[in-house]
Image: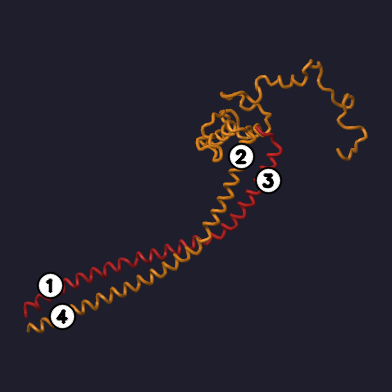
Amino acid sequence: MIVVALVMLIVVFPVVVYLLNSVLKEAKAITPSINRIAAAAHAGSKDLDAAPLLLTTQQQVRDTVANVAAYGGSLDVIVDDA
Amino acid sequence: MAGALLIIAVVLIVLALVYFLGMVIFELQKITEGLDTAIDGVVEIIAKSEPVNPIVSDINLNLDAAVDALEGLLVKKAGLPEAMGLIEGLYPGAKKDGLRNFPDSATVKSPRIGEVYTRGTLTLARLGREAPIAALSPNGPALRDARYGSRASRGLYPADRPGRSPIIGTNSPVQYEVEDADPSAV
């Protein structure tokens, strides 16, 4: 009986403490990474605030292409073919 | 004695379990909160980037149409060899890529236009066909003979060139403005 008690006290208890401490250490190591991921996600989201400006770009490209097409059509009439 | 030792060992193990598992649970809660925050950010990114793809596709579609039209116009007006020579002159190395709608454009033999003239001259020359462009081109005839350009003016008087300069002024035989023209229009 006393041998079992000593084994529990000298072997099992340190092993349990070591294993649990390792788990706690790894869990604590995850937290900063998660915080960095959250910060990066928010920063990425903020960077995309300018995405609606693409609608303006889209319209400007359409207008520019229309002008280029009109200019090309005029050149086609003015300049002789090769 | 042995029973007491055993009880102490068990109690210590239980206490260690309670402490460490409690700390692990606390850390897991922090991880969960961090993940929730990160997921919120990712959801925002997805929502904000959702319309980007169709908009960029539309922009590319319009630009592709413009490029096709301009390439077609250039080839139609200048001819494929000269067009590729002009492109190579303006953007060295661009000829090897060729034009998208002209499969022969990458391999066609074109004059080295850009070696002799500036971009502005090239553009005006190809549009107007007047400048002495490509006179020094090693391939193909010049559009206009630069060294003997007087041939063109002699062509104006095929029979014989008059020994005088054109008469201009009030006594010239040809008046380019009628006498009763409205002076306010000048």
The disc placed on residue A11 is: 1
Q: The chain coloured orange carries which letter?
A: B
Image point (42%, 67%), residue name: B39
Quarter of the image for residue B149 reads top right
The disc placed on residue B72 is: 2
Q: Which chain does the residue under circle 2 lie in? A: B
Q: Residues within 10 Å of mark 1 (few under 14, many from 20)?
A: few
In the rendering, at what x and y percent does residue B89 appear?
Answer: 56, 33
Chain A display color: red
- Circles 4, 3 touching at the beta carbon (< 8 Å): no
- Per the model, the C-alpha gap separating discs 4 and 3 is 90 Å
Q: Which residue is mark 4?
A: B10
- Tell me which label, 1 or 3, sits earlier in the chain: 1
In this rendering, the label closer to the viewer, 1 or 3: 3
Q: Disc 1 marks which amino acid?
A: Val
- Per the model, the C-alpha gap separating discs 2 and 3 is 14 Å
Q: Residue furthest right?
A: B180
